[in-house]
Image (cartoon, grey):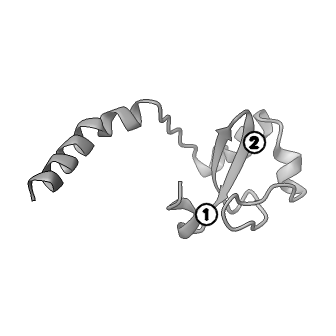
Amino acid sequence: MRLFYFKIKNFFKTLPELFKSTKVKMVYDSDLSNLVESLGIKTKIENGDFLCRFCNVQITLENLGSIQKDVGELRFTCTNLECLSKL
């Protein structure tokens, strides 16, 4: 029991460190079109060029749940709760 307590205690000590490098930016639905246009990907989204990184469903402006930058490449997640929970 003591070892378990020690692991949990250490986990909570390191928890703030996990979130230091995480940036979360939110966008209103009304601003989404402007955001994807400013990123230069609006036409590609409208053409269905991007897929959800988890379920491979085609990303549209209606189902765009998140955009992440991963090794210089944009990755997309749909609005499916199962996919969003994997972030």
Q: What element carries label 2?
A: helix
Q: Is mark 1 on a helix, strand or loop?
A: loop
Looking at the rendered structure, which numbered label has been put on residue 79? 1
Q: Position of residue 35 (x, y in %)?
A: 70, 39
Looking at the rendered structure, which numbered label has been put on residue 36? 2
Q: Which residue is drawn at 61% across and 63% down?
A: 79
Sooner in the amino-acid sequence: mark 1 or mark 2: 2
The amino acid type found where label 2 is placed reads Val
Q: Position of residue 1 (x, y in %)?
A: 10, 59
Q: Is residue 13 left or right of residue 75?
A: left
User: In the rendered view, would you say 74 is above or below 83?
Assistant: above
Q: Quadrant of residue 40?
A: top right
Labels 1 & 2 near each other (Cβ < 8 A): no
Q: In this view, does 86 lie to the left or right of 45?
A: left
Q: Disc 1 vs disc 2: which is toward the camera?
A: 1
Q: Where is residue 17 in the image (x, y as percent from the top left)?
A: 35, 32
Extreme-left residue of the structure: 2
Mark 2 burial class by Cα count in 10 Å: few <14, some 14-19, many 20+: some
The amino acid type found where label 1 is placed reads Thr
Q: Which residue is drawn at 58% across and 43% down?
A: 27
User: In the rendered view, would you say 55 is above or below 66?
Assistant: below
Distance between the alpha carbons at the discs numbered 1 and 2: 16 Å
Q: Quadrant of residue 78?
A: bottom right
Mark 1 burial class by Cα count in 10 Å: few <14, some 14-19, many 20+: some
Nearest the viewer among 7 and 21 is: 7
Q: Residue at x 67, y 38 (%)?
A: 69
User: In the rendered view, would you say 26 is above or below 58?
Assistant: above
Q: Which residue is drawn at 69% across and 68% down?
A: 55
Q: Where is residue 83 in the image (x, y as percent from the top left)?
A: 58, 64
